[in-house]
């Protein structure tokens, strides 16, 4: 079945786009905003409301299926695409309309491959791929009379899930209240913690370590019997910023944190930013190796400098993440 029309509708994202470089440099917060000048190109303020652009595919049976084109919170940092510009994205999407009208929406991966061919020898922005692939997935699910999950499993040769997929939740800055909510709802992986500034990490990481211990204690205090979540903390590179970029010292610190919460699996996301994908891979591999050799319950999660499928393959092959 062919797509007979393409619709575009501007909208708002659920959160905000933040200038990570400015925040990491230590700008003060004023309520929900940040005080100071933006650093990353494209930002007019350090925190700006997230914008989006929805793409609707009208099928020949008059069904409209939608996807949402937008970017990530920390656009323009860590190797990510620049800040989302709805006008630019709209223009680029308009240039691939003829591709969308020409594909067979019944075949999901084939349709994606054709639509996402380079435009003027350049890869399309991730925001376009993200939103258009959503719409194409919904189109395939509609045409096959299946769920989107079933289409994904079929296209990638995966077995259908036989149990609930673990849910990972983020606390934001209202840490204590939101951690309690997560525990009461028995969230599988928590709390993220948003450790994205020096005062949240503390001198030598003491503030962070106290928070980790508090979360573990709180799960036992108010969690239901048998509740045992994975503890996951995103530190936004602050281990490296506070104690230095020597992998041995970073691993030592992570082990100390893990030792304060025995019995829990501890995920540490983005312990340090080494400035490039290759440097990130080499140094994360050293950290992972040290943790594994010690039999630590801590696991390294990569975010910065890992933005494409090829990046993921490189990190995995180098054993630079768990």
Image (cartoon, rainbow, N blue to C red):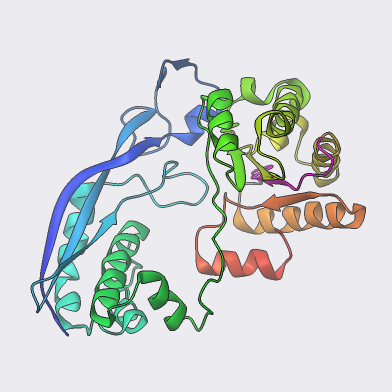
In the rendered view, tell whether residue 108 sits above or below residue 201: below
Q: Quadrant of residue 59?
A: bottom left
Q: How many marks?
A: 0
Decide whether residue 94 is among the magenta residues: no
In the rendered view, tell whether residue 166 sits above or below residue 227: below
Left or right of residue 266, residue 29 in this image: left
Rendered residue at 90%/57% (across/down) = 293
Left or right of residue 153, residue 59 in this image: left
Q: Position of residue 281 (x, y in %)?
A: 68, 58
Residue projecting furthest to the right: 294
User: Would you say residue 120 is visible in this rendering?
Assistant: no
Q: Position of residue 144 (x, y in %)?
A: 28, 82
Rendered residue at 73%/53% (across/down) = 284
Which image quadrant: the C terminus? bottom right
Residue projecting furthest to the front: 225
Q: Nearer the viewer, residue 12 or 262?
A: 262
Q: Position of residue 157 (x, y in %)?
A: 50, 84
Q: Nearer the viewer, residue 213 or 218?
A: 218
Q: Which residues are magenta?
A: 261-274
Q: Quadrant of residue 115?
A: bottom left
Rendered residue at 22%/51% (across/down) = 53
Secondary structure of the magenta portion, mostly? loop
Residue projecting furthest to the top: 30
Q: Position of residue 180 (x, y in %)?
A: 58, 29
Rendered residue at 17%/85% (across/down) = 1
Decide whether residue 273 is among the magenta residues: yes
Q: Nearer the viewer, residue 262 or 111?
A: 262
Left or right of residue 34, residue 124 in this image: left
User: Would you say residue 217 is visible in this rendering?
Assistant: yes
Q: Quadrant of residue 12?
A: top left
Q: Nearer the viewer, residue 79 or 202?
A: 202
């Amino acid at each position: 079945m062919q797509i007979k029309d393409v619709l575009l509708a501007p909208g708002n994202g659920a959160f905000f786009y933040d200038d990570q470089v400015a925040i990491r440099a230590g700008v003060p917060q004023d309520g929900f905003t940040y005080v100071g000048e933006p650093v990353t190109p494209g930002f007019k303020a350090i925190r700006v409301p997230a914008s989006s652009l929805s793409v609707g595919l009208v099928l020949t049976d008059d069904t409209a299926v939608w996807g949402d084109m937008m970017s990530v919170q920390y656009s323009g940092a860590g190797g990510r695409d620049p800040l989302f510009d709805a006008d630019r994205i709209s223009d680029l999407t308009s240039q691939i309309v003829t591709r969308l009208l020409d594909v067979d929406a019944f075949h999901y991966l084939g349709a994606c491959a054709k639509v996402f061919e380079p435009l003027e020898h350049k890869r399309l922005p991730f925001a376009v791929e993200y939103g258009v692939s959503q719409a194409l997935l919904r189109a395939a699910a509609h045409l096959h009379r299946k769920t989107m999950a079933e289409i994904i499993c079929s296209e990638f040769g995966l077995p259908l899930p036989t149990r609930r997929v673990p849910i990972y939740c983020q606390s934001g800055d209202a840490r204590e209240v939101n951690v309690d909510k997560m525990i009461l709802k028995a969230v599988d992986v928590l709390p993220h913690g948003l450790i994205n500034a020096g005062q949240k990490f503390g001198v030598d990481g003491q503030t962070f370590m106290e928070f980790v211990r508090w979360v573990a204690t709180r799960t036992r205090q108010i969690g239901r019997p048998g509740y045992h979540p994975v503890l996951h903390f995103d530190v936004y590179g602050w281990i490296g910023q506070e104690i230095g970029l020597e992998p041995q010292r970073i691993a030592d610190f992570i082990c100390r944190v893990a030792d304060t919460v025995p019995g829990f699996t501890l995920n540490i996301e983005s312990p340090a930013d080494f400035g490039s994908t290759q440097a990130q891979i080499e140094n994360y591999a050293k950290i992972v190796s040290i943790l594994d050799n010690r039999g630590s319950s801590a696991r390294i999660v990569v975010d910065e400098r890992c933005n494409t499928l090829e990046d993921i393959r490189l990190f995995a092959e180098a054993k630079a993440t768990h």
